[in-house]
Image (spheres, helix red, strand yellow):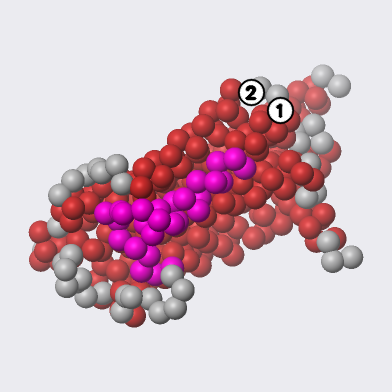
Amino acid sequence: MHWLQMGGYWPWVWPSYGLTLLVVVLNIVTARRSLRAARAEVRRRLQMQRSNP
Amino acid sequence: MAWIWFHKLGSPPHFYRLAGRMTPWFAWPALLLCLGGLYGGLVSAPADYQQGEGFRIIYVHAPAAWLSVMIYSAMAVYAAVGRIWRINVCHALAASCAGIGASFTLVALVTGSLWGRPMWGTYWEWDPRLTSELVLLFLYLGYMGLRSAIDDTARADRASAVLAIVGAVNVPIIHYSVTWWNSLHQAPSVMKFGKSSMPASMLIPLLMMLLGFTLFFVAIMLVRARGEVLRRERGAQWVAEAAVEA
């Protein structure tokens, strides 16, 4: 508990770490989603080409 | 002969496969370094004699600020290489950098504000370092906005590359702002020539975080760039093979 108080600086320390963690997670999620979307788009094009040769 | 590796990297299929293989080699060390750095910074480093426990914000603020400037420099170099040698992979890399750079610039600004409130008594001051960092955020947003405003990828590459290269003039301004002008922001204490002014117990976790964040950026950039390359090359035969393999 004492450690979480950060000597009274917790209102500035923990939001800083929270925001950083959020941005790190968002970067991971968006990067993976972007790659997955690009792959799905390629697969869709391939399927369309195969169905309409 | 020595430049063969460089030309090979410019080949989209080669880059796509190499980036896929390299990503875990950056991601896992990044995770380990950040966990070690967090433990060192939040638990084992002693409180600062002036700033108390509030100084621990430095373990996320300094790596974010470092990334904001380093990513912009990388983006400008990729844009210049792409523009000069017309290497599409470099434009894809530059485009992949922008979102990551903008997000870490925002983190640097917000965590800096959160540190400034208890230490300076204000969240914001039109200080040279803070203002030039804010200009950097606008440069990232301008780069992203310009790219999304132009439908033709080749035209978007050319136009955004010019903006990235011209905007690079802000990078040395950010770095030297604390020495060129009177600034509330402290002078460099880690990245300066000679001995660091921080004790090892504080410095080592910070260096671990700096390296961890840098490796994290490379890993994320490679994932984003792979998607960007796939989108650009969607008509090519190798893309069909890569999509089937995945």
Per the rendered image, the range of residues in magenta is B165-191
Q: Amino acid at mark 2?
A: Ile
Residue A3 visible somewhere in the drawing: yes
Extreme-front residue of the structure: B181
In the image, residue B42 sits, relative to residue B127, either above or below, namely: below
In the image, residue B141 sits, relative to residue B212, either above or below, namely: above
* Residue matched to label 1: B155
Percent x, y for residue B200? 34, 80
From the viewer's perspective, is B112 left or right of B221?
left
Percent x, y for residue B120? 18, 53
* Residue matched to label 2: B150
Q: Secondary structure at mark 1?
A: helix
Local crowd size for mark 2, using a 10 Å CA cut-off: few (<14), some (14–19), many (≥20):
some
From the viewer's perspective, is B16 left or right of B178?
right
Local crowd size for mark 1, using a 10 Å CA cut-off: few (<14), some (14–19), many (≥20):
few
From the viewer's perspective, is B236 left or right of B194?
right
Percent x, y for residue B21? 67, 59
| Residue B173 on the magenta segment | yes
Q: Which residue corresponds to the image point at 64% horizontal and 23% vertical from the top-left?
A: B150
Mark 2 touching mark 1, by CB under 8 A? Answer: yes
| Residue B170 on the magenta segment | yes
